[in-house]
Image (tube, grey):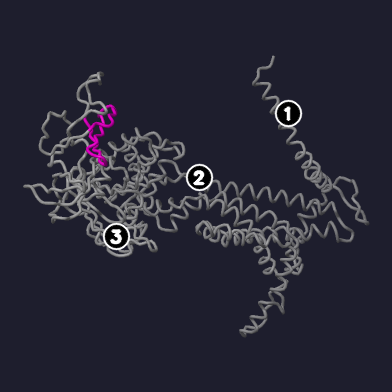
Amino acid sequence: MSDSIAIELRDVVKRFGDVIAVDHVNLQIRDGEFFSLLGPSGCGKTSTLRMIAGFELPTAGSILIHGREMGITPPHLRPVNTVFQSYALFPHMTVAQNVAFGLEMRKKPKDEIARQVKEALELVRLSGLEERRPRQLSGGQQQRVALARALVNHPEVLLLDEPLGALDQKLRKEMQLELKSLQARVGITFVFVTHDQEEALTMSDRIAVMNKGKLLQVGTPTEIYERPNCRFVADFIGETNFIDGVVIGRDGNYTVLETPEGLRFRGLATRPLSDGTAVTYSIRPEKVRLLAPNGELPPNGLAGTVMTVNYIGSDTRITVRINDRRTIDIWEQNTRSTLDRDEYWQPGEAAVIVCPPDNALVLSE
Amino acid sequence: MATLQQQQQRRDRIRLALLLTPGLLWLLLFFALPLVIIFIYSFMTNDALGRVVYEPTLNNYVTIFTQSLYVNAYWRSIWTSVLTTVICLLIGYPLAVFIARSPQQWRMPLLMLILIPFWTNFLVRIYAWQIILANNGIINGLLEIIGIGRLPLLNNEGATLVGLIYGELPFMVLPLYAAIDRFDFTLMEAAADLGANKVQAFLRIMLPMTMPGIVAGSVLVFIPTLGQFVVSELLGGAKVDYLGNLIQRLFLRANPINWPLGSAMAVLMMLVLLVLIMMYFRVTSEEER
């Protein structure tokens, strides 16, 4: 069950006039998976979702749901349901009527509809609000109605188009966890579209990162964050220090690059790179270490000057200048509970940064 | 001592009264008063010269309910108005959807095309239809050329209907457009997503949600159509009597003129309208529920 494929995209292309919204995407989404399509607005993630739902047809390529070629099957005959960004609840119907709609369309008997509507509303913790109209509900409650309305049909796949976008930050976090646990309970494949990388990392079993219609990387949240396969993914997911240079050789497992001003960095390359290739070195701020100078530079160390020190609660964010045109950001976790910041790094202080090569990546475009 | 809030409320009330007075006076003088006069006249009678004689009687109403001339006029006008309204709705709804779904920059020009005929006097436009439908008119000219031969298109009830639909269509399209423009078409996708085909999605979602536009458009078309007399006179050839024609004749041209009977017909027409529209609101608001 868990290794069968719920949705397969084969070389899918979508054009709107001259614009290529989705550019030769190949993708397999496994059964029971919480799968996120992540990317900036206009990256093609919503178009991809709409093609799965059947609201748009691919210009080329094919979409299979549980092995069945969808072709030009209209949305009402596809075994998927959608939670819309705007919820798209029917304003002239009560909560119960909204949830019952899909079952009525499938001509289920009345008593069964009543029972399933009740169950679905219990599932999303909305029991007691059956007779309310959508406009009488809060954003979070509307969100739950949209979920119940889709899930009550037991779709093979649930498509969610930025469903948390309209909620405030706190509610959003709550709904993220709730959605995740809901998905685990119902066991339905979720395909979740979002532009919020943190949301995708929190909720997903696997993430597909898209940009400009292209699928850049598919992987678990850890893989996407720790081993981005290109500069865009490294940049879009989390924060990172980028340093441009060219490959000048290898040192054991590591690829060595040199910057125009002659600094050398070591990191892991995601694929073999020949000497002279233009590359970008990437290291996450929390992976850089900051030491007091003791006369001798450690391996992978660089001398610099502390520029700014910003306390943000859980972390302290420090910027260190290493030469005329380069700074490195470093995040240090505030592990000691002390209010006495005088002994901490001060702007203007000399410091040494260490970039462990196992935590650094050498990325090519 | 009144509180500041009470003082302010009093001042607001005085301002409101001042603002409303001109409008209220106008309505009283030119709407309510004539209506009262018509109502009183409807219980009077006339003399051989057509003057109103102040002798209270119910004869006018008895006449209307017993003579087929009047009964038929009511039925004919109601039936024609229903037909006009339904056809305007059937033409106007798709048209309004088309305009509302057009690219933003096209919507205003398309609405203007609907409104442009209003720049010309209604009578002139109805005369234009005479030219189009006449025996030696444009359509018959074309029919002759393609070998079908001339058809009697003018001076019948069909011509009246065509003229009425032509004249009233904008009053249907504009409120429909307003309702459909507000309608969120994502809801149609949501319905399709939940297993509704196009017809089901329309009947269950779009129709009830655009019902206010349908009601407004229907009322706007139905009311003037029920009392009209110009179109049936100019295009229908005045062969059969509609309510408006009868009332107009009783007031202006009958020998002797009979204002009391005409007033009674007008009062009854208003009653008919009131009842029909209340029934209509009832049915459509149930639909919405």
Q: CA distance from mark 1 to mark 2?
A: 41 Å
Query: What stretch of residues is rendered in magenta?
Result: A305-332
For residue B249, above or below residue A142: below
> Is there CB contact under 8 Å for labels 1 and 2?
no
Distance (Cα) linking label 2 and label 3: 45 Å
Q: Is residue A95 magenta?
A: no
Residue B289's tag is 2
- Mark 3, residue position: A23
Report the number of discs. Answer: 3
Characterize the local packing of mark 3: few (<14), some (14-19) or many (20 or more) Cα atoms within 10 angstroms.
Answer: many
Circle 1 sits in a helix, a strand or a loop, which is it? helix
Residue type (three-letter) at the residue carrying disc 1: Ile
**Mark closest to the chain's N terminus, 1 or 2:** 1
Q: Residues within 10 Å of mark 1 (few under 14, many from 20)?
A: few
Callout in the foreground (2, 3): 3
Circles 1 and 2 on the same chain? yes
Asked if the residue at tag 3 contacts the one at tag 1, i.e. Cβ–Cβ closer than 8 Å, the answer is no
Image side of residue A66 versus residue B40, left or right: left
* Residue at the (38%, 61%) spot, across then down: A16
User: In the drawing, does residue B190 fall left or right of residue B119?
Assistant: left
Residue occupying the far top of the picture: B1
Q: Which residue is mark 1?
A: B14
Q: In front: A123, or B83?
A: A123
Q: Residue at x 29, y 38 (%)?
A: A176
Q: Position of residue A155 (x, y in %)?
A: 29, 50
Chain of the residue under label 3:
A
Rendered view: B181 above or below A169: below
Q: Amino acid at mark 2?
A: Arg
In x, y percent, where is residue B115? Answer: 64, 59
